[in-house]
Structures are given as C-alpha cells and as structure tokens.
Amino acid sequence: MIIKTITIRNVFKTFYCNIIMKIMSTALSLVNLINIGFKYVMDTSQLYKIDESHAVKHSMEVYGLAKNIYESEFKSNPYLEKQREIIYMASIGHDMCDKKYMDEKQGILRYKEYLSDHMSPSDLEIMGQIIGTMSYSKVKVNGYPNLGEYQLAYHIVREADLLAAYDIDRCIMFRMYNNSDKNITYSEALLEALDLFDYRVLKMRKDKLFVTNYAKRESLKLHRKAEKDIVSLSEILKK
C-alpha cells in the first residue's frame, strides 16, 4: 500500500514537472523570438536608414500595445495563444518593409526569410499578410482583408499601430526627417503634423477603425490627450 502511494505521488510529481518544464520552455522560446525580432529591427533600420519615427522605439511601442490588446482579448478568445507569435512578430517588424523606406514586397519577404528558422511557414505567411494589409491607407482603400481565424490577430496588430499614431511628436519627427526640403523647420513640420491629425488621426474613432474593447477605450484617452497637445503646441505658432 505504501509502495502504491509513493508510486502515485511520483507519477503526479513527474506529470506536473513536465507541465512546468513545457511552460518554461515555451516562455523562453517566445522571449528568444522577441529578441530576434528587435535585433532585426535595429539592423534593418541602420541598413535602410529608417529614421527614429519608425525604427526601434516605434516597434517597441506597437509591440507593447499589441501585447496589451492581446492580453485583454485572450480572456474571451483563448485560441489566440496559438497565434501569439504571429501577433508579436508582426507588431515588432511591421515597419521594416514600409514603402517609405524600401520596396514593400521585398521587405516582407526579407523579414520572413530572417524568421524562417524560428517560425512555421504557415505562421510566416499569415504574418506577412497582416503586415502587408494593415496600414491606414490600405484599409481606407481596400477595407479589411478576410483572414479567417486570424482576423482578430490582424486587428490587434493594426490597432496597436493606430494607437501609436496619436503621438504628435512622432509625426513631427517624421516630417523633419523625410521632406524634400531638408531644411524644414520644427514649426513647418508641426504645421504639416497638425494637418495630418486634422484629416486623419483625429478621425480614426469616427471612422470606427477600432474594434476591440481595449483599443476603443485607449483610443478615447489618446484622442483627448492629442487634442490637448495640439492646443499646447499650436500656441508656438501664434508667437
């Protein structure tokens, strides 16, 4: 009887140890993949001279927002766990194929090839489709793609990028870095940024571009903050 009890205990101990080891292995694998993703962003930003408005800091912001949306949606959509790598890697590398800096299709292919030893071909294909269809301009022209079971994953990455767009300083920065007139001043870039916010950013909520509850709540906060920032920054132009 004692031997039987000990045997049962050992079985349960082994069972739970295996579960813990599997969880730890999965977590380490994900961390390693995220590290690889950000290394790619750093190297690609240097190679293609991607300015800081779309480089590492922006990638970190979009990744962080995507992670928050994912965690909020996971409670009611547990199947997302199997798509987490796609969501995280799409959010990290989404601007490493931006047509403002390179050929978009070649950029997506290059990113997929870089990750080919770490993600399955099917996951890489979906990641590429998300990156290639998530931009504001493409959604306004073509609407949302039909990605089936990956539709929510698509919206998570897309919404994270939109939420990051509420940062008006980032918009000013981009205008200063990327302008035919390289001598553009801060105030001139500010004027262009204000124009962009007027016809695009501050209309994103009205255009119903946010579908998840987290993004709807967060976009309202960021929208209100952006309006205050605009008032404050506009005072500069009056002096």
Image (tube, rainbow, N blue to C red):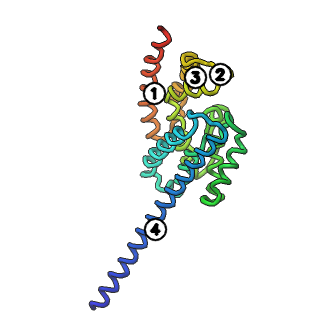
Residue shown at the point (43%, 69%) measured from the top left: 21
Q: Which image quadrant: the N terminus?
A: bottom left
Q: How crowded is the residue under tag 2: few (<14 C-alpha within 10 Å), some, or many (20+)?
A: few
Closer to us: 65 or 204: 65
Q: How crowded is the residue under tag 4: few (<14 C-alpha within 10 Å), some, or many (20+)?
A: few
| Label 1 – label 4 distance at C-alpha | 42 Å
Left or right of 93 in this view: 230: left
Dot placed on the residue nearer the N-terminal end, 4 or 2: 4
Find disc 3 in the rendering and name its residue. Answer: 196
Please tell me whether mark 4 sits on a helix, a strand or a loop.
Answer: helix
Q: How crowded is the residue under tag 1: few (<14 C-alpha within 10 Å), some, or many (20+)?
A: some
| Label 4 – label 3 distance at C-alpha | 48 Å
| Label 2 – label 3 distance at C-alpha | 19 Å
Please tell me whether mark 3 sits on a helix, a strand or a loop.
Answer: helix
Dot placed on the residue nearer the N-terminal end, 1 or 4: 4
Task: Give amino acid for label 4.
Answer: Lys
Measured from the top left, where is residue 154 in percent x and y?
57, 45
Find disc 4 in the rendering and name its residue. Answer: 22
Choose mark 1 or mark 3, whichever is in front: 3
| Label 4 – label 2 distance at C-alpha | 53 Å
Dot placed on the residue nearer the N-terminal end, 1 or 3: 3
Left or right of 200 in this view: 110: right
| Label 1 – label 2 distance at C-alpha | 30 Å
